[in-house]
Image (cartoon, rainbow, N blue to C red):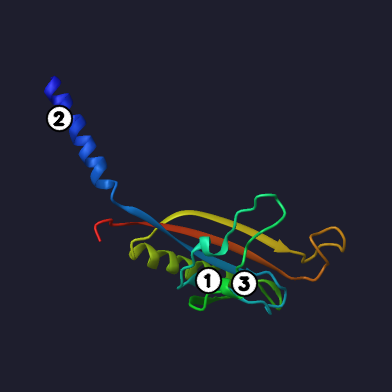
Amino acid sequence: MKALIQFFIISMICVNFSFGQNRIEFKVVTIVESIVPGGVGRSRIIETGSELNVDDFSADRTDGKKSKLDADRKDLKVDEFNEAKLLNFYSITGINFQNIASNDALITSKINKLIDEGWDLAFVTSGVESDAGVSKGLGGGQNDGKGIFITRLFFKRVIDGSD
């Protein structure tokens, strides 16, 4: 029995060691859907084709006021990204459920494509910014009838550590 337990413990250590060589990478896909009456907004699925290193654009503050951050805003912008057109939530006559269903089909297609490429959907977060229909002074800004609904899809996949 003692030998069986020792074999089990050694096996678990070996299994953990072999899996410990893998890394996880993440991908973020952002969905921007316009909440602008009349259908004049722009809606897209955005996926970056470039990588940035956050350390290149970060600095530690020591006194809470002064920052030695030398990064230029223009250096933060990526040139390579993929965008897929979506329809707006509103048309001339108001909310358009056909547009929403069409967007759902496109978003589902994007998710399925990434899953086929080995990505797993890890989590989703969303938010809305809209002053549409808000009385002036009561909302986040003026009653300009504009807004966006943003959804971020976070994907992950395991990278084999043997390369």
Q: Where is residue 96 in the image (x, y as percent from the top left)?
A: 64, 71
Are discs 1 and 2 less than 8 Å apart at CB? no
Report the front residue among 91 and 34. 34
Residue to which mark 1 is pinned: 45
Regarding mark 3 in the picture, which secondary structure is present there?
loop
Q: Which of marks 1 and 3 is nearer the N terminus?
A: 1
**As drawn, is 91 to the left or to the right of 24?**
right
Nearer mark to the viewer, of 1 and 3 = 3
Q: What residue type is labelled 2?
A: Phe
Mark pair 2, 3: CA separation: 57 Å
**Residue at (71% x, 73% y) in the render:** 36
Rendered image: mark on residue 120: none
Going 72% across and 54% down the picture, which residue do you hit?
65
Tags 1 and 3 in contact by the CB under 8 Å rule?
Answer: no
Gap between marks 1 and 2 measured at Cα? 51 Å
Horizontally, residue 64 falls left or right of residue 10, namely right
